[in-house]
Amino acid sequence: MSSLRSDVILIHPPAHSDLRGGTGIPTPAGMGTLSSPFMETYPPDLPYVAAYLEKNGVSAQILNLARLAAKSPRASLRGEIAGIKAKLVCVVLEHLHRCRGALDTAAIVKEFLPQTPVALFGAVASHFHDELVSLPVVDYVVSGDSVEEPLLQLLESISGEVGLDQLPNLTYKDGSGSVRTNPLSYLPASLDYLGDGVAYFFRRVFRRGEKESLPPLWNWRRYPALFIPVGRGCGRECLHCEQGSRSERCGREKMALRPPERIVYDLEITSKITTAPIYLVGDLLEGGEDFCSEVLELIADVDPPNHLVFDLFLPPAREFMDRVASSMSHFNFRMTPLTHDEELRMGMGKAFTNEELEQLLGWAMDAGCSRFYLYFRIGLPGQDRQSVKETVEYCGELLRRFGPRVHPLISPVYPHYPPGSAIYQQPERFGLSVFYHHIAEQARAMSSPHWREHLGYETRWMDREELVITTYEALIELNALKAKSGLIPPRLASQIDRYYRDALSLLKMLDESGIAQSPSAAGHTGEKLTSAASDLMARFPLTNRELLLPLHGYRFHPIRKIRYSLGIP
């Protein structure tokens, strides 16, 4: 049980609050990420929020409930929350797949701490701000992607120093119970004000009280990867994405950047403490050529031994690859082509051809790239079952041409498109049927053990059942192609194949038993399914083992680990 005591507790909730104890089948939505089905990887700038609050005299702690749930079958949300002492509890609601866990967490906080106000923030919370505040378990929603200053002012208001109607970005209930929404007036164009998030993280993650509740991955002790944000928002307008949204409560005209020296300072600290991979979240090229060049020059001065992973939104010029190769020893890339279908891809806002993608892969391989992750999606407008099959075949062609350093991944759009995206906002225009129009409806749907029922949409080209079946067909075939190319060892590929087939069989059993539609009617069959689902959950790490990049030397530098655990930088 945790015993966190701070002015502000920032809680990252699990995707599902009872996944360990029910018949829920792990969804394949997390394929291609390092997270477990509890989705324990929190937004990369959450430690920066905590660091900013502390820099301004407010004690703050992060409680990663999702990680605790993923690590221990005995973990109890109620037990962890019962030990909290705080002036304000904040629950992060960044992604729609975490809506049930977030609302369950808020309800438990209210049960044990009825006098403690509960605030939600994150992209999804921003979109549903008025509906969320109308719920009895939520007092406030802080909208926008920069909540640090609004949270400071909210604490002042809770202390009676300032009225709620004066606070930026805030949605709240007034004295009569009516929902009020203040303007989104705090949206800083530059992020040079942010605190030292990585330093905050390492000061605390080795302490006795926070070493289990703070890490961003269930297996972080064995694979201590870290995520460093480049900025917030995006200047592009991809139809499937929240970041490029111009929505009223969380949109930006262009990406807000962190100063290059702060990005590389975080990278340098991390490389001195751990040899694990470091992910730079956000495309450096979105900041312009000068910004990108400055970051790479500073990285070259540090010369980290770690594997660095860079995001790419669009194929860059060859000169970029050459600059990256000359700046560091181990570099990798992540990119989301979505589909092999060029027309469909360009219609989604990804303006590049397969020829340009393949040219980029050739440049990256020539430059010495260790791994190039390519993310494809299932559930796109205009995409049918045959199109998904052709995408998998295209992945096989890329593996044949470029070898196992190219790493294709595929997963469904789950449980819906981001609420701020154009597709979510205008589903009929893009051929989608929507089942849940409110976040409370979506949260209730997430209680089903069958992830088909979680899907809040289907398309004109594939209904929900087809989306499920097509997903497993694609995963099984792509796994076989990876084994054939040498990307995955044969024994691991065989275990992963069995995992996917067992998951599909269990989903069929759920339908045959009627539990998928009525979980309360479980009975003896439900007990069997619960046991089988628990076994499947225990095998889930097999599916992301292929993503792990090598560590160079010890996981942690022992002397520096001790220094940081004592609060000595």
Image: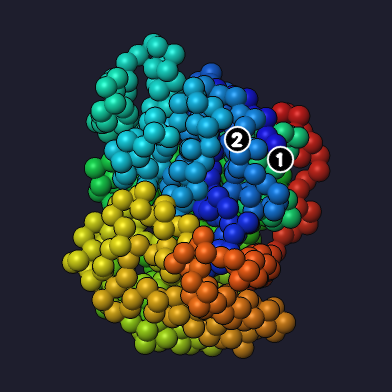
Q: Give the percent coordinates (x, y) of residue 282.
A: 44, 53
Q: Which residue is mark 1?
A: 211
Q: Earlier in the sequence, mark 1 or mark 2?
A: 2
Q: Secondary structure at mark 2?
A: helix
Q: Quadrant of the N terminus?
A: top right
Q: Residue at x 53, y 85 (%)?
A: 477
Q: Residue at x 37, y 87 (%)?
A: 386
Q: Is residue 135 left or right of residue 34?
A: left
Q: Position of residue 11 (x, y in %)?
A: 54, 38
| Helix, strand or loop for disc 1 | loop
Left or right placement of residue 113 versus residue 2 in this view: left
Q: How many marks?
A: 2
Question: Which residue corresponds to mark 2?
Answer: 81
Rate crowding at label 2 as few (under 14), some (14 to 19) or many (20 or more) other CA atoms within 10 Å.
many
Which numbered marker is on residue 114? none
Coordinates of residue 434 in the picture (x, y in percent): 28, 63
Amino acid identity at mark 1: Lys
In this orientation, does residue 53 appear? Answer: no
Q: Toward the viewer: 234 or 130?
A: 130
Q: Is residue 122 visible?
A: yes
Q: Residue at x 51, y 68 (%)?
A: 515
